Image (cartoon, rainbow, N blue to C red):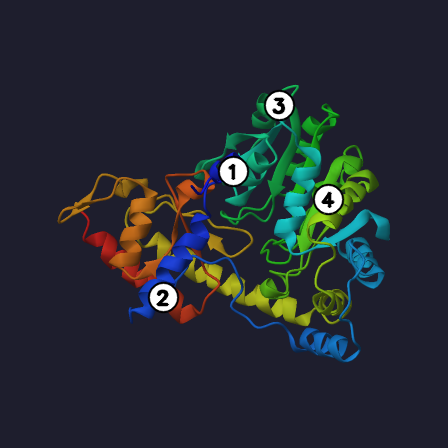
Amino acid sequence: MNQLSDRLNALSPSQTLAMSQKSNELKAQGVDVINLSVGEPDFNTPDHIKEAAKKAIDDNFSRYSPVMGYPALRNAIVEKLKKENNLTYTADQISCSNGAKQSVCNVIMTLVGAGDEVIIPAPYWVSYPEMVKLADGKPVFVSAGIEQDFKITPSQLEAAITPKTKALILCSPSNPTGSVYNKEEFAGLAAVIAKHPQIIVIADEIYEHINYVGKHESIAQFSEIFDRVVIVNGVSKAYAMTGWRIGFIAGPAWIVKACNKLQGQYTSGPCSVSQKAAEAAYTGTQVPVEEMRKAFERRRNLIVKLAKEIPGFEVNKPEGAFYLFPKCSSYFGKTVGDRKINDAQDLAMYLLEVGHVACVGGGAFGSPECIRMSYATSDENIVESMRRIKEALAALK
């Protein structure tokens, strides 16, 4: 008998990956599917970064690195945080891992134990609650709908805090909504956190450079909570390096040390060649980052305009990342033939099988009234996918 652990059985599979797999299966059958389900840039890694990786191979960077990453990479991250974010860290307050996803999980696994509560604003990235469950913790969801631009308020945060609250996860710019907290909004949340010294903030800033408001704000800038904030970031989104798998945390030395202890037992240091590539990303020219950001902004404007022309869609204007998260509940209960749309998951499957556009139902992100579309694709694909969606939805009565 194949007996899986209770820990694994408690986990939900990733719906974003499942949707991507389903669209790939249809593509393999010859169906022309436009995939708006994946969260990765469609650009190639900039050439100077690739050259650094090739040089690293020639220079024999082929052995184990320190668990927390090479000192040169950690120092480059220290410089980046000082220059771009006006935040002061030392190299021993930085730990590099196999992608920002592992970085988030490391922090949760080192801080959260049985019965501890972790506040997660909804909509949320699919993996946050699953990681908390993996650590035997309890996810506590705070819902923020489209009417408040998917951002929680200080009073909502205050109401969710209990003596068992161990951490708060914040993602700005946000996956799945693209919402961005401004300085005033973060100041309001920081004032609440300051009153509760047991709470650690996990600040997921992986989409930092894909923002359309001019300046990224970090909640770590507020001195009264600085020593309780762990920043998570990495090279995947800003530098089109999703497959290189380099993320990092910057935070209090005691948490970083604990994450190193954990990582030392289950993956050790991240890929040596990828680290040299990431070092070049942080120390080299930032021109490609801005070029990609401009392209994403143009696509954001295009998809928002087209989505607003679809009857029954409620659309906000995301200020960062590369996702649109329209509210589509007006279609729930509608039918075509013997097919009924009960929820966002049904709608996403209908759009895939009938419209041949892959999106992800919002239930996976804690907002069952929405669907997530990634516009990390060409302008032509955006125009065609919106046309297909509009046509498929028009058939529902």
Q: Position of residue 212 (x, y in %)?
A: 58, 56
Residue under label 4: 262
Judged by depth in the image, the label closer to the viewer, 3 or 2, is 3
Mark nearer the N terminus (2 vs 1): 1
Residue under label 2: 383
Asked if one can make out residue 390 in the rendered structure from this viewpoint, the answer is yes
Mark nearer the N terminus (1 vs 4): 1
- Locate residue 48: give its quadrant: bottom right
Q: Amino acid at mark 4?
A: Leu
Q: Position of residue 33 (x, y in %)?
A: 33, 66
Q: CA distance from mark 2 to mark 1?
A: 45 Å
Judged by depth in the image, the label closer to the viewer, 2 or 4, is 4
The residue sitting at 39% across, 64% down in the picture is: 382
Mark nearer the N terminus (3 vs 2): 3
Q: Amino acid at mark 3?
A: Ile
Q: Amino acid at mark 2?
A: Val
Q: Amino acid at mark 1?
A: Ser
Horizontally, residue 1 falls left or right of residue 206, namely: left
